[in-house]
Amino acid sequence: MRVDLFDFELPDDRIALRPAEPRDAARLLVVPPQGAFSDAGVRDIPAFLRPGDVLVVNDTKVIPARLDGVRVRGEAVARIEATLHKREGADRWRAFIRPAKKVHIGERIRFGQDSESMACLLGELDAEVIEKGEGGDVLLAFSFSGPALDDAILRHGHMPLPPYIASKRGEDARDEKDYQTLFARDPGAVAAPTASLHFTPELVAAIEARGVTIERVTLHVGAGTFLPVKADDTSEHKMHAEYGVISAEVAERLEVARARGGRIMAAGTTSLRILETAAQETGRIRAFAGDTSIFITPGYQFRAVDVLLTNFHLPRSTLFMLVSAFSGLERMREAYTHAMASGYRFYSYGDACLLIRTP
C-alpha cells in the first residue's frame, strides 16, 4: 500500500509532553466496529470488558538506552549520541548513532565522557564499532559484558524519550518513573509499551473485579518503533527485529480462556505483535521465545487479538498502519480526526483509544 495513505496533519499542541495525573485520568476514545465513537476515560475500561476476558500486558522494563560519548581520531574529537535498540550478545548491542558519518568500522567510542574530560583515556564504558548498516544503525562491541555492562549502562545512560518529546524538553527525574509501566519487571526495552502507562493499581483491581484475568508477555521494544517509514510503499519497508517471550503456561491459559468464549485484549501494539507472532494459522497461540519483525498492515488477518488498547500514533508510522489494519484505514482516519477536534492528547504520554474489532 502507498505510505502516503497513512499520513495526516497533527498540530504541535496535541503532542503530550507529560502524562495525565494520575495515570488513569487519561481520556479514552472507544472505537467499535461500526457506529458512533464514544468519549470515555481510561478508568472506564472495565465497563467495556466481560467476565472471562483476558487482558495481556507487556512486562518489559525500559533501560536508560541513550548514551552520550566521544570519538577521538588524532586531534579530532567528535561527540556521538547512541541509542541502543537490540541486544545481540553479552557484550554487543545494535544502536542508532548520530552523527553516523563521523564513525568508521573499527573505531572506539568512549561513553560517559566529553571532550573536556579526555585526560583519562580509559573510559568506563568503551565500545568498538564492528558493523555499520543503513540509517545510522551500527553494531557495538562493548568493553564490558553481561551484568557488568548492564550496570555500566545504568550509570551512564539516559532515559530514551521519544524524539517528539526530547526535541521539546529535556529528560528529567520525573521521566524515570513516568516512562515506566506498572507491570515493568524484565529489563531490555528502549521504548515504553505506552498503552500500559495508563494503568494504576486501582484500575487493575477494578479490571480483575470485573472477572477479567491479566496475563504477562514480554516484548523488548526497540527504538525502531519511532522510525518513520521512508519508503513509498509498505512492501519496501524493513522492520527492525525485537525479542519477545510467551511462556507455555501463559499460552495455555490464553487458549483455555478463548475456548470458554473469552476475548483477548492486548494492552498496546507491543503485546499485540508478540501475540500475533506466536499465533498459528489455526489461531492457536503457542509458546514463543525469539525475535519478531512482524509488520502488520491493512489486509492482515488477525488470529489472536479481539480488543486493542493503544495510544494515538505518528503519521506514516508502522503503528498507525497496524491500528488501521485492526479497525480499518478509513475508520481510524475518522477516529483520529474526531480525537484532534475533541482535544485528545497524542503519542507516548497522551490519551488512549480502545479498538474493538468484529470477531
Image (cartoon, rainbow, N blue to C red):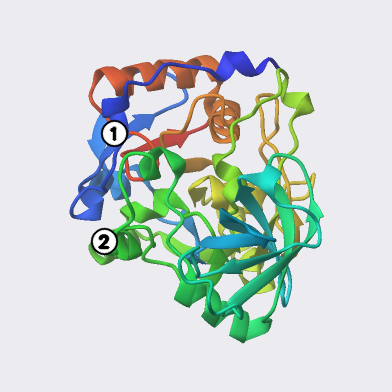
First reached walking from the N terminus: tag 2 or tag 1: 2
Q: Nearer the viewer, residue 151 or 43?
A: 151
Q: Nearer the viewer, residue 253 or 277?
A: 277
Q: Residue at x 62, y 50 (%)?
A: 97
State the separation of the CA atoms marked 2 and 1: 19 Å
Side (left or right) of 170 relative to 84 = left
Does residue 2 lie above or below 109 as drawn? above
Question: Split into 4 quadrants, where in the image is the N terminus?
Answer: top right
Q: Residue at x 32, y 50 (%)?
A: 170
Find disc 2 in the rendering and name its residue: 174
Image-quadrant location for residue 145:
bottom right
Image-quadrant location for residue 269:
top right
- Type of amino acid under label 1: Arg
Find disc 1 in the rendering and name its residue: 345
- Type of amino acid under label 2: Arg
> Can residue 17 be seen in the rendering of this structure?
yes
